[in-house]
Amino acid sequence: MALRFEVLGRFNRARAAQLTLPHFACQTPLFMPVGTQGTIKGLTTDQLEEIGCQIILGNTYHLALRPTSELIDELGGLHKFMNWPRALLTDSGGFQMVSLLHLADITEKGVTFQSPVDGKPMLLTPEESIQIQNRIGADIIMALDDVVRTTITGPRIEEAMYRTLRWVDRCIAAHKRPHEQNLFGIVQGGLDPVLRDICVRGLVDRNLPGYAIGGLAGGEDKDSFWRVVAQCTAALPEDKPRYVMGVGYPLDIVVCSALGADMYDCVYPTRTARFGTALVPEGVLKLKHNAMVNDTRPIDPTCACMVCKNYTRAYIHCLVTKDAMGSQLLSYHNLYYMLQFPKGDVPEWVCNAMDVAGIDISSCCSS
């Protein structure tokens, strides 16, 4: 095991911890921006350090296609390749079973993708996923799981859960760098509490360095979402990090943290920036709207980031309609914002989840 996880403080189910990885000592709860191909679009690694980014997520499937894991390994690993001194996490490629379903064929052996680059078939087995991630060299690597959307019902959910447990054993056997890289297992089971419980218990029995809760943020209602997170965090070990995959809305992160989760990732803050939208305490601010033409206020008067200190809404409005720098500035602001807690009224589902976590926020809840 190549990590140390120390809980520094608790409030009911919520906890703050130090997660010490080979390349960085991280403070949790933490959000990980997604750098699909070894980059956060529009931002330098120096800027990411400046705003407090601790871990960047890379995509195994896309890195294997371009520039290839062999080249990354030859050039000293992804840290050196992208000039990033802090921690990295690579996903397993499992999410592409959902996002590229029209290009994927899933069997017990693995998943065969039709490459979006050249159209050639690419078989990603649990063994191959781990071999690719061993070459890339991230601090945390993910077991290949069988991913289905939570909106799907029926026997496919059970099939995927049991296959995920079988595949994690193949991932463990294939992992050649356990003293340098930490293999996390992923809890599947859809919205079925019985299947989730079976998967949690199966993964805990394998005594992995950390655990992720997968298969969420795929269209399920918020009450179902937080109940799955609450169930899984309650059953996962106290002394291991817990990672809720694909979660990036600020309220979702606050709720999951209150329920005992530690780590999150999502493309949302940077993707929404590229569409000209800023994250603010009231929700979102659309900088492309004509109302911004003469607005001399910063994006968020309460924000201390470099963008809000130096640029007006009017200026950024000019950029987002004409220049790539607009999305760069908004990406910077949005990632900085993700370090802050949201303010103002919150929906009823948040109040219900917080109540289960032992936190009374009824005075903040919208009626």
Image (spheres, helix red, strand yellow):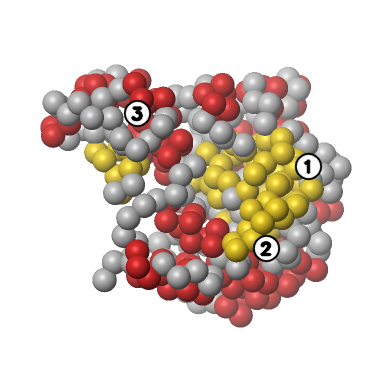
Looking at the rendered structure, the number of numbered marks drawn on it comes to 3
- Disc 1: which residue: 181
For image coordinates 41% across by 67% down, the residue present is: 361
Residue at the image position 15 percent from the left and 27 percent from the top: 293
Q: Secondary structure at mark 1?
A: loop
* C-alpha distance separating marks 2 and 1: 20 Å
Q: Is residue 191 left or right of residue 273?
A: right
Q: Residue at x 55, y 50 (%)?
A: 264
Describe the element under mark 2 as helix, strand or loop.
helix
Q: In this view of the protein, which residue sits in the foreground, 330 or 37? A: 330
Please state the horizontal and vertical placement of residue 227, each as a whole percent of the image. 51, 72
The foreground one among 218 and 160 is 218
- First of labels 2, 1 by sequence position: 2
User: Element type at marker 3?
Assistant: helix
Callout 1 touching callout 3 (CB < 8 Å): no
Of the residues tagged 1 and 3, which is closer to the observer?
A: 3
Name the residue beneath numbered marker 2.
Answer: 164
Q: Are marks 2 and 1 in contact (CB under 8 Å)?
A: no
The answer to whether any part of residue 176 appears in the image is: no
Q: Is residue 109 above or below residue 31?
A: below
Q: Which residue is mark 3?
A: 308
Image height check: is 322 above or below 98?
above
User: Residue 234, position in %: x, y?
Assistant: 64, 71
Q: What's under tag 1, amino acid-wise? A: Gln
CA neighbours of label 2 inside 10 A, class few (<14), some (14 to 19), many (20+): many
Q: Amino acid at mark 3?
A: Cys
Q: CA distance from mark 2 to mark 3?
A: 44 Å
Question: Percent position (x, y) of residue 355?
Answer: 47, 73
Q: Amino acid at mark 2?
A: Thr
Query: Please, is residue 126 above or below residue 355 in the view?
Result: above
